Each structure stands twice: as C-alpha cells, then as structure tokens.
Image (cartoon, rainbow, N blue to C red):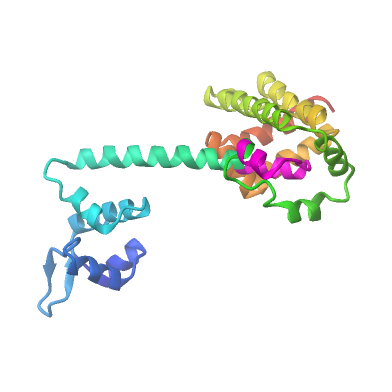
C-alpha cells in the first residue's frame, strides 16, 4: 500500500510543503509516483520520516539528520539505540527542570528573600518569582500564606538549600515506595505523607491534615505539580495524593 503526500502529511502532522522540501533536498524521496507523476509513499518511507521527525524534534539540523540516516555503518537497531539514549538524556533534563519549577513555586509562595545571585545558586536558571502574581491572588489572604511569608523573611541562602534537600529526600522516599509497588494506603506510604506534612508545619506554615489533603488534590489537579511529581517518577502525583488522603483519614 502506498500513500499520497496529503495522507502522509496528515499522518505525521507536517505540511505538504515540508514533504516537498524533504524530497527536493534528497532527505525523503517517495518510493514511487503514480501515472500523473504524484508522489506515493510506502511503509519504508514512513519509517524514514518518523526517524527524520524524531531527530528534528531533538534539534538536529537537516544536514545532520541526513548524515545520521544515511550512515552505511548504522543499522535500524543502532538508530533505536541512539534514539533511546537521546530520549533518556532529554527526560533526565526535563525531570530536573520540573523539580526546579516546583521548588521555585514553593519558594515564591513562601516569600523567598534572596538576591538574584543566590536565587540562581539555589534554583538554577528557573525564576522563583515566575508565579508571584498567581500565588498572591490564590493565597494572599490566607493565614498560611502570611505565616510562610513571616518565616521565609528570616531564611538565608543556606537555609533554602537545606529545605530543598530535605523536601527532595521526602519526595525520593515516596518515589521509592511507588517503585517497589507498595500501596499508597500502606503504613509506610502514610508515614512519608505525614513526614511531608510535618515538614510544611516546621518550615513554612501550620498545615492541618485537612489542608494537607487539599494540597494533595492540587498535586494532581494542577498540571505543573503533576508534571513535577511525575517527572520524579511516573504516577507519583496520584500516588502522593492517595498517600496524603490515606494519612489524613488515619488521623481523623
């Protein structure tokens, strides 16, 4: 079976003009043409297009894509291995970015008081002021927000580093339980959820089990929190929420 240029464009989510360009530069020439001279693509052409679009997504220029695909020493298995390596590196980078975004959100909600240089040292290239307006709008009138602002005003750069490391360790323990297949309603998972709640109480503001449950729901409902937790380990956002709710029920 062969496919028209319009069908292939629809399959791949690219424009017909893009496919014409790929043909013109020899990157992807269709295997056949019909009697009218129109391009017809077969399954092998679609496989090559998939590899082209993958490398383009990772930022490779077209000349490098052509060199990779036409390397006589590379077999299909080698392409898969290379793609897996590149994807793994991208995932690792995105996980770090997501964790930094959550730290930035938490820091701003707690009234972070650092110089620009210190912010960069603690949070990398993610701006902790990014969500300032949203945080003020959503929580500015709450006692928890005011208390977190009061506490944060006295925190130094080293304090923030310790807080970040402590929170990362809690998230890591919860992720490990998930990886081991331990139920979210287990004693072990509820204990880590309680540790998370008491961390908030000790470091930021008084967090009741009811308020903690609301936070747990937000970790799933807010796509930014969900992405951060799932970046640590897929499924962690829901697992964290369920453990928090189970812990709250245990203490009710």
The outermost residue toward the top is: 188
Q: Quadrant of the C terminus?
A: top right
Give coordinates of residue 116: x percent, y percent: 67, 45
- In the rendered view, would you say 146 is above or below 29? above
* Magenta highlight: main SS: helix
Q: Measuring 27% from the left and 55% from the top, which residue is drawn there?
A: 52
- Viewer-side residue, 2 vs 61: 61
Residue sitting at x 52%, y 26%: 179
- Residue 169 at what x, y percent from top left? 63, 24
Q: Position of residue 13 (x, y in %)?
A: 36, 64
Q: Which residues are magenta?
A: 101-121
Residue 207 in which image quadrant? top right
Front residue of 169/111: it is 111
Residue 217, visible in the rendered structure: no
Between 152 and 157, the one lying in front of the other is: 157
Return the x and y of residue 17 as percentages of the image width and height. 29, 73
Q: Which residue is at 24% across, 42% downward?
A: 79
Residue 22 occupies which quadrant of the picture?
bottom left
Task: Work out whether residue 101 can be spotted.
Answer: yes
Q: How many marks?
A: 0
* The image quarter in which residue 185 lies: top right
Horizontal side of 190 relative to 48 (left or right) equals right
Magenta stretch containing residue 120, yes or no? yes
Quarter the N terminus occupies: bottom left
- As for residue 249 lying within the magenta part, the answer is no
Image check: 208 left or right of 49? right
Q: Is residue 114 left or right of residue 223?
A: right
Q: Farthest residue in the bottom direction? A: 36
């Amino acid at each position: 079976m062969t496919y028209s240029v319009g069908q292939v464009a629809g399959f791949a989510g690219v424009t017909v003009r893009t496919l014409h360009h790929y043909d013109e530069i020899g990157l992807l020439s269709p295997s056949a043409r019909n009697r009218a001279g129109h391009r017809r693509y077969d399954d092998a052409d679609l496989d090559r297009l998939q590899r082209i679009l993958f490398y383009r997504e990772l930022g490779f220029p077209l000349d490098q894509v052509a060199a990779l695909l036409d390397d006589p020493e590379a077999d299909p298995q080698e392409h898969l291995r290379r793609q897996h390596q590149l994807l793994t590196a991208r995932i690792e980078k995105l996980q770090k970015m997501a964790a930094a975004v959550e730290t930035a959100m938490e820091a701003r909600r707690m009234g972070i008081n650092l110089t620009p240089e210190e912010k960069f040292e603690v949070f990398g290239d993610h701006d902790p002021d990014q969500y300032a307006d949203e945080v003020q709008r959503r929580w500015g009138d709450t006692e928890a927000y005011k208390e977190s602002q009061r506490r944060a005003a006295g925190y130094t750069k080293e304090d923030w580093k310790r807080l970040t490391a402590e929170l990362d360790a809690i998230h890591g323990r919860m992720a490990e339980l998930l990886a081991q297949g331990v139920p979210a309603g287990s004693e072990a998972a509820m204990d880590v959820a309680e540790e998370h709640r008491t961390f908030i109480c000790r470091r930021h503001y008084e967090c009741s089990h009811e308020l903690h449950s609301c936070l747990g729901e937000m970790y799933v409902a807010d796509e930014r929190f969900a992405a951060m937790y799932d970046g640590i380990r897929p499924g962690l956002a829901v697992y964290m929420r369920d453990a928090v709710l189970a812990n709250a029920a245990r203490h009710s």
